[in-house]
Amino acid sequence: MTQNGLRWRIAGGSGDGAITTAQSAAKALMRSGRNVFTHQHYTSRIRGGHIYVEISASDDEVQSRGDGYNILLSLGDSFARNPAEDAYYGNEELKPLTENLDDLREGGVIVYDSGLIDEEQVAEIDLEERAEENDWHVYPIDLRAIAKDHGREIMRNTAGIGAVAALVDLDPSYFKELIRENMSGDTMEANLEVFDEAYEGAGDLDQTHELSVSEPNPHDEEQALVSGSDAIAYGALDAGCRFIAGYPMTPWTDVFTIMSQNLPQFGGISEQVEDEIAAAALAIGASHAGVKAMSGSSGGGFALMSEPLGLAEMTETPVVLIEAMRAGPSTGMPTKPEQGDLEHVLYTSQGDSARVVLAPANQEECYEQIRTAFEIAYEYQIPAILVYDQKLQGELRNVDASFFDREPDADPGSVLSEEEIAEAAEHHAGKFERFDYDAAEGVPENVRPRSVPGQKGGRYLATGNEHNEAGHISEDPDNRVLQMDRRIGKLENIREELDEKGNQTHHGPEDAEYGIMTWGSQQDTVFEAVDRLNDAGHSVKALGVSDLMPYPEAEVSEFLESVEECLVVEMNATGQFRGLTQKELGRFGPKLSSLLKYNGNPFEPAEIVEGFESSIEDEELAVNNMKYVPAAGD
């Protein structure tokens, strides 16, 4: 491929089908033998408003969305509220073209629907002049007319895909195969005709661009095109989750929907309830009854789960919760990514926190770490929270299908049999001492195995009040200290187990002079930037941290001790992960500086490269919409 691979942006209006179209195009490119990565940018409006999806495709591994793109397919916005330029939101019909030009690389290709965006509108934005300055190659094609000739206007998306495929020499057979798979009857036939007409028509154009794609190399094994939401849901099912309760809220809704669609075939249950308090409470109740259960939400919805989260901590009821971050506070920007909920997830609820918090960075980690969350939650009788963001929620990436070929985990965790209950500690009144101070044989320290309702001799009280060994309310000072220390003490045992799993990810030369740390969805973008920095002569390595509570003090300490300075990269305005690191490892504060971005768009590798170079050269940051915060004392 030329220009470092194919980076294709499909832009349109919300409701015009651009996202579905892009997903099909990405799958076709994957099947043709390429590695793919998609990035979504969409409005919170149901219909209308500018959205786009980027598809990166290469013979090599694609770690991130990259910098900019080289093909724009602008479908226009057929749901525009007001096409007038002086309207409050501007000419929305034209925005899928005008608002995407700044990121288009030199030598790029533009295909726009001239049936929706007319020549007069294009003249008003000086597209011809800008195209000449940037060596852009513009192809107006009446996609709307092609679609209408064969039936419905919505098929102009298919026409756009066909036109681009012809202009950059993509094999049409993979796209047509997907049409046959996803459609039937007259609809399928009409879309095939639209694709063929657009493909042939674009192929006959006088092409001035040099951008084309090389022949792909077939994948060594079958590939699966999955999002972070897919991986979380499939991992939860394989972890033995058989109950989920929730209320829809972007971007958590994807996981909830996928789980709800698949749980029945595994004998599981999904409940959509009236609010997030009820959702978390139902999941805790199901877990108390002996079922592996989960719930989740985003932002404000997760805030409502604070009270039941505290109940799960006090009653030592295992449950897995999902927090899908989006830009806040309050409703904020509901469809834009941000990493601003870290402190909220770590500390929300009442009193001192006794929970596990994991933050996966990519699809493989989503699958692995949701399984880890269930394993830890049910072994240690503690809530486990998986936190991710809108970026990871929706982006698609190809993964070896064999990666997901795992045995399901039916282990209920630390649950006693009736025979074991009979031999366990009992109060003289005959109640099972569920919260006994003494460790039971064969279970982790500080964990007291539980019974489940219906087991003979297993009755105990589960209350949100502080309680004694049998669950009765107790305000005795000695009991309080013993119970509190035991609950909090689980985190030390969990830390040892997580250290064996190795959730943190290192990248770059071990003896590097400088470090970059990050967490969650920015990890692979940071890793790509580190590769570029080392190629440019810098000496840099990176650490992606997934374990946020309990914090991996030993591993992070070793990393920070080995570098002179460390730049912490995250998507929020206050440096929350840097703050957490300084809270846990204060002695490294003078080494830590921050590179922050919180404008609703994730980092691009070039931005991290420039941010790093500015930090070590002590220069003013030149990149817009980023913020550099120096180390304490600088």
Image: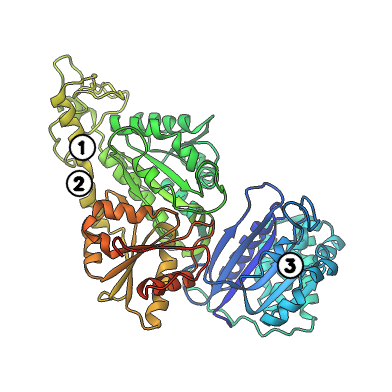
Which mark is drawn over residue 493? 2
Image vertical order of residue 340 relative to residue 282, above or below: below
Residue at the top extreme of this rendering: 429
Counting residues from the N terminus, which is met first, the one under dot 3 or under dot 1?
A: 3
* Residue 543 picture quarter: bottom left
Secondary structure state at the residue bearing disc 1: loop
The reply to whether discs 2 and 3 touch (Cβ–Cβ < 8 Å) is: no
Q: Is residue 267 visible?
A: no
Question: Between marks 3 and 1, how big is the CA–CA gap?
Answer: 59 Å
Secondary structure state at the residue bearing disc 2: helix
Q: Residue at x 45, y 33 (%)?
A: 304
The residue at which mark 1 appears reads as: 447
Counting residues from the N terminus, which is met first, the one under dot 2 or under dot 3?
A: 3
The kind of residue on which mark 1 rests is: Val
> Which of the image's four quarters has the C terminus?
bottom left
Q: Residue at x 34, y 44 (%)?
A: 346
Question: Between marks 2 and 3, how big is the CA–CA gap?
Answer: 56 Å
Image vertical order of residue 24 relative to residue 123, above or below: above
